[in-house]
Image: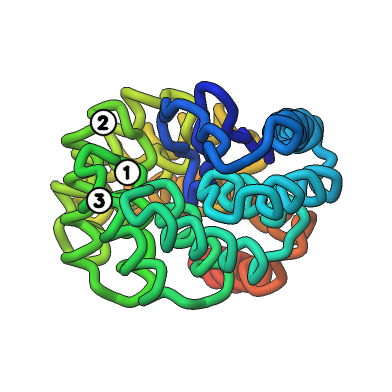
Amino acid sequence: MILRFLILIFSAFTISLGIESLSSHAQPITQPSTQISPKLAQAYVDYYISGVIKGTAGDYKGAIDDFTEVIRIKPDDAIAYYNRGLAKSGLGDKYGAIADYTETIRLKPDYAYAYYNRGNIKIKLGDKYGAIADYTETIRLKPDDASAYYNRGVVKGELRDKYGEIADYTEAIRLKPNFAIAYFNRGVVKGELGDKYGAITDYTETIRLKPDDAIAYYNRGVAKVKLGDTKGAISDYTEAIRLKPDYASAYFNRGLAKIILGGKQGGLNELRRAAQLFQRQGNTAQYQNALKIIGEMEKLR
């Protein structure tokens, strides 16, 4: 995980729930107060630059020490708290990071990225409603932030608000039409809600944007089976296997699909291959399930 610390032109650090990260954010560096003596002003700048350099290099403890000195010299420096929050996050100090992002927000209530990053950490701490509140504030301050909509959608899904989840993924896609993971997740939720055609459409768009996404092919195959398009499903399972040769579930489902179409022997071969992969991958439950189906099919010879 790379932390982008803020100096001169600030680049906003993000932790995404999926594969997405926020776009860059530009803002002039906070200047020393006129009340700071020239000597302290130079120390302020030196510590600030040193903190950025250390943070960028992964020396988060050193960065924390430097930004703490910056804050000692200039206690109202919101961005110094923000940067120290980044460093604390890099060290895994979630509560410390939240405290610094909260102080950033107190000093600079319109700083959207502090809300966003605080929301990301709240998710890790299990505070889902708190995370939603922070993403909502991010969106209020920065309505074109696709990642905030996407992350809020993920959390809504964890809270079983499926329609709210779909609405947020839809907005994320509107703002960022090439947002492949948002299409994928929306497809999953549509499938869960019984909208098979909608799910297929979203998986198809995922594949267009990310042609190497084996899981999107697999999920589209599952949706096609439910619609009776068994041949189309076999085609998707085959592509999933081409992209991911050890994809046990794709072999398993392709085997069942072949059996449905009358290719019993070919289907059994697929199920045996799936069983081998499940066993190798330590998936005991699916391994046993595959053996059970194979045994039942062999009795029907």
Q: CA distance from mark 2 to mark 1?
A: 9 Å
Q: Camera-side residue: 199 or 296? A: 199
Q: Camera-side residue: 267 or 127? A: 127
**Residue 176's mark?**
2
Q: Camera-side residue: 97 or 300? A: 97
> Could you classify mark 2 by the number of other residues whose Cα lies within 10 Å: few (under 14), some (14-19), or many (20 or more)?
some
Quadrant assignment for the N terminus: top right
Q: CA distance from mark 2 to mark 3?
A: 14 Å
Residue kind at label 2, given as amino acid type: Lys
Q: Which residue is mark 1?
A: 182
Q: Is residue 295 above or below residue 281?
A: below
Expressed as whole percent of the image width and height from the top left, the position of residue 188 reads: 31, 55
**Residue 139's mark?**
3
Q: Are marks 2 and 1 in contact (CB under 8 Å)?
A: yes
- Sequence-wise, the earlier of marks 2 and 1 is 2
Expressed as whole percent of the image width and height from the top left, the position of residue 3 reads: 65, 38
Query: Residue 245 lies in what quarter of the image?
Result: top right
Residue drawn at x 80%, y 38% is: 58
Q: Is residue 138 above or below residue 122?
A: above
Describe the element under mark 1 as helix, strand or loop.
Answer: helix
Q: Is residue 6 left or right of residue 62?
A: left
Describe the element under mark 2 as helix, strand or loop.
Answer: loop
Residue drawn at x 81%, y 50% is: 65
Q: CA distance from mark 3 to mark 1?
A: 17 Å
Residue kind at label 1, given as amino acid type: Ala
